[in-house]
C-alpha cells in the first residue's frame, strides 16, 4: 500500500481506542422510514455488499463479539441498525446490497430505504463503503458510489478481509481503488485496509472517525 497516506497521530489513535473501548449500545433497527430515529448528533454509516463483513467490522471496531449480528447467510441485516458509540456519535449498519437471501420485493424495499436515508439524513457525516480486498470495486459498488456522489454524501472506502490476500495483491487493490476515486467528488481520498479477524487497520479506522468528529467540532468523550 502507498507510503504516501498520512499516518494517524498518537493522540488520535489513543482517543479512538478509548472511545471504542467504552460504551456501545444498540439503539434500534429501522425497516422503513417511519422507524428512523430523530436526527440527533452525528451519524456515521457502514455500507457494502451483503457478504463484505460489515457486522464483523462493527464488532471488531468496538471489541465486542455480538454487538452487531453476524451470519454465514449474506443479507441477514435487513434493517438500518443504529448504535450509540460512547455518546459521541451514532454508528449505522446499513442493509447489504448486491445479494440477499430474501424475496425480490423485500430487497426492493431495502433499496428504497437506503436511498431515502442517504438523501434525507442531514446529520449523516460520512458513509464508509466496505469493499472486499479479494475482489476490489465491483459494478454494484460503483452504483452506490454514483448515488453518494449525486447526493453529495461524503464517503470513504474501507477494504475488508485484508488478511485473506497477499501483501502484493492488497497493495494492487489499494492503488486501483485510490485511482478509481480520483474523479469522484464526494470521495474522501484515503483508503483503509482492515481485517476483522486480526484487528488489522482497526486503530487507523477508529482514528479516522475521531478526526472526522473533531472536524465537526464535537468533543469526543473517552472517560
Image (cartoon, rainbow, N blue to C red):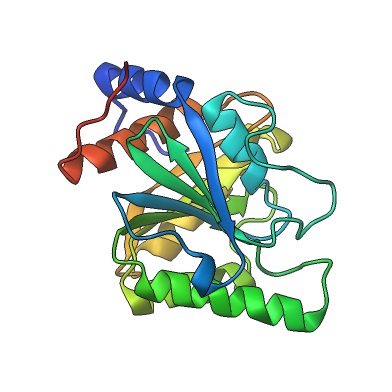
Q: Foreground: 31 or 192?
A: 31
Decide: is 8 above or below 146. above
Residue 5 appears in the picture as rendered: no
Residue at (63% x, 67% y) in the render: 138
Residue at (76% x, 68% y) in the render: 99
Residue 57 position, x and y percent, is: 60, 38
Q: Foreground: 198 or 213?
A: 213
Residue 223 position, x and y percent, is: 32, 16
Quarter of the figure with residue 188: bottom left
Residue 1 position, x and y percent, is: 48, 38
Quarter of the figure with residue 150: bottom left
Quarter of the figure with residue 203: top left
Total labels drawn: 0
Decide: is 159 above or below 196. below
Q: Foreground: 38 or 2?
A: 38
Residue 59 position, x and y percent, is: 61, 33
Does residue 205 appear left or right of residue 124 in this picture?
Answer: right
Amino acid at each position: 500500500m502507498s507510503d504516501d497516506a498520512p499516518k494517524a497521530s498518537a493522540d488520535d489513535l489513543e482517543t479512538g481506542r478509548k472511545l471504542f473501548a467504552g460504551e456501545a449500545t444498540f439503539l434500534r433497527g429501522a425497516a422503513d422510514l417511519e422507524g428512523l430515529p430523530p436526527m440527533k448528533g452525528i451519524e456515521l454509516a457502514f455500507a457494502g455488499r451483503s457478504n463484505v463483513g460489515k457486522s464483523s467490522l462493527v464488532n471488531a471496531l468496538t471489541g465486542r463479539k455480538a454487538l452487531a449480528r453476524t451470519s454465514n447467510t449474506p443479507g441477514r441485516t435487513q434493517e438500518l441498525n443504529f448504535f450509540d458509540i460512547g455518546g459521541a456519535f451514532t454508528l449505522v449498519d446499513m442493509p447489504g446490497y448486491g445479494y440477499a437471501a430474501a424475496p425480490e420485493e423485500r430487497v426492493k424495499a431495502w433499496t428504497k430505504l437506503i436511498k431515502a436515508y442517504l438523501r434525507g439524513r442531514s446529520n449523516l457525516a460520512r458513509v464508509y463503503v466496505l469493499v472486499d480486498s479479494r475482489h476490489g470495486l465491483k459494478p454494484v459498488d460503483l452504483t452506490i458510489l454514483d448515488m453518494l456522489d449525486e447526493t453529495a454524501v461524503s464517503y470513504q472506502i474501507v477494504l475488508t478481509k485484508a488478511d485473506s490476500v497477499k501483501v502484493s495483491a492488497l497493495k494492487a487493490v489499494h492503488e486501483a481503488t485510490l485511482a478509481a476515486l480520483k474523479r469522484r467528488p464526494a470521495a474522501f481520498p484515503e483508503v483503509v485496509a482492515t481485517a476483522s479477524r486480526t484487528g488489522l487497520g482497526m486503530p487507523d479506522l477508529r482514528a479516522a472517525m475521531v478526526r472526522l468528529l473533531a472536524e465537526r467540532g464535537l468533543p469526543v468523550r473517552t472517560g
